[in-house]
Image (cartoon, helix red, strand yellow):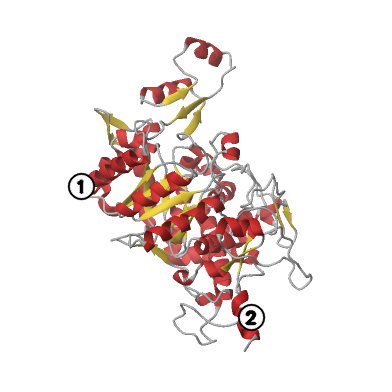
Amino acid sequence: MISWLKNNDAIGTVNRGVPAESGLCTLCLSSCKGTCETWMSSLVGRKLLYPRNFGDITAGANHVTSLGIGYHALRIQGYAYGAHGAKDNSPDYCLFTNVNVETEFGNEVKTKCRIPIMTGALGSTFIAAKYWNSFAVGAALCGIPIVVGENVVGVDKKSVMSQGKITSAPELERRIEVFLRYFDGYGAIIVQMNVEDTRNGVAEFIINKYGDKVILELKWGQGAKDIGGEIQVESIDYARFLKDRGYLVDPDPYDPKVEAAYKARAITSFARHSRLGGTDLSSAEEVYRSFMDSIAYLRKLGYKRITLKTGAYGNEALALAIKCASDAKLDLLTIDGAGGGTGMSPWNMMQHWGVPSLALHAKTYEYCKILEEKGKYVPDISLAGGFAREDHIFKAIALAAPYTKIVCMGRAPMIPGFLGSNIEGVFKPEKKAELNGHWDELPPSVTAVGKYPEEIFAGWEEVKAKVGADEMDNIPFGAIAMYTYADKLKCGLQQFMAGARKFNISSIDRSDLMSANRETEEVTGIPFMTEALDAEAKKILNW
């Protein structure tokens, strides 16, 4: 097992806990005072691309790319000539700042994105609700899609149902409308549906109220767990409300023994679980037919843009998801590798179930290529599972190119929301509770950057120019932090792409990668670094 370093002395970042391959701590606290790479990027932006104390230091790489199988064991090629996808191949134009990182996905209707990233599904977990304003406004400002996860309607105490179907959904409506307020044609609001959402009539409610402003996403699973989504609630009354809504609640809040244990404080919380999907289906063929019937129904309702999210299941389920997305002409298929999550998944399930991202994504490329060679429609692909940095974005797009159009990031874009809310709570103490801020004063990790908001956030002036000075009072600091973080990702991606001589996203391909060890070569089909382009090299020597 690879032990990832907690400190990066070159850029001055430190992880509080044990870092995962993504560079994030395995346990990310909303109250954290820094200073991992994503946390610091939310303040200083693209400055964090470079070693600190410039002019007084020299810095060298410290990497473990030769050990183990994973995205860390893919390396990005650089080239000494050429400019693919550039509007003008002159040296004066081919600057990394002119690399176009915009992307789009979709079948008949294209969804444009300013950066090739989207958020993971932010659903019924309370942390998503608490910081939604930061997440949604940030996504709209960045021009990227944000996903409203499953069960938001079902857990909302204020939602109203009639004959088992939703008629009012205040929390879902809030989430959609916060994003749409700042939506400028780039990005999208995507609403995810699971078994309970389907039963509750969420699809019908959305199409009637919002029409084609919302993309609908069906969910088969995720990279964090092999079981339905869950949250924990501390109130027995809320637990009973959820059970009455039809959810599995564990332990049973109506059991007298459980009630007694709750009163004695032996039981302090209840887990609400979603149902497993497809339990009444016994073969891949049955799943396929049922799925196609569901899509036909949604098309009849009026949905023009539909996506599918699947998890870290094995090869058969992966192929089935790709086949269904192909035949249903879906706009996007998100494939989430094992190990992900936003905080509520059983820990050992996160550790031990499913196919890790690199292996799953390598098979995604293989299966998409089979469909393409058969002349079939290949859905646009979004890859997910432990991504947080610009090199992750490049590698994921290249690994399954040309099918990957966008990369899904779950935990990483949430960190700016936490950080910005904590900072805003210090400057606006009267709103601290509303903002879910944790701090009473700025910690040294922030004051080392600046003492007032315009100084703390590198992206402040860009956001101000975008929305106008009068609107800045309405922009959450968490959204500004997210914009700052996204700018760092954009700049870093532009630099990688310029070095690979690729000036737009569609020019990136698998030849832009090489494997750093034989195991990764075997899994991905990406040549080992001493063999990548070796034939071309020997041709030159034989001129």
The residue at the far front in this view is 542
Position of residue 215 relative to residue 273, above or below, is below
Q: Residues within 10 Å of mark 2 (few under 14, many from 20)?
A: few
Dot in front, 1 or 2: 2
Which residue is denoted by mark 2 in the rendering? 538
Q: Residue 117 carries which label?
A: none
Q: Is residue 487 left or right of residue 55?
A: left
Above or below, 54 relative to 362: below
Q: Mark 2 or mark 1, which is nearer the start of the sequence?
A: 1
Q: In this view, does 372 lie to the left or right of 452?
A: left
The quadrant holding residue 203 is top left
As rendered, which of 494 and 450 lies closer to the eye? Answer: 494
Residue drawn at x 47%, y 47% is 315
Residue 178, visible in the rendered structure: no
Residue 258 in view (yes/no): yes
Q: How many marks?
A: 2
* Amino acid bearing label 1: Lys
Residue 327 appears left or right of 23: left
**Residue 147 in the image: above or below residue 142:** above
> In this figure, which residue is indicated by the disc labeled 1?
300
- Packing grade of label 1 (10 A; few <14, some 14-19, many >=20) is few
Q: Nearer the viewer, residue 524 or 99?
A: 524
Horizontal and vertical percent for residue 162?
Answer: 25, 29
Q: In this view, does 215 lie to the left or right of 9?
A: left
Q: Residue at x 42, y 21 (%)?
A: 240
Regarding mark 1 in the picture, which secondary structure is present there?
A: helix
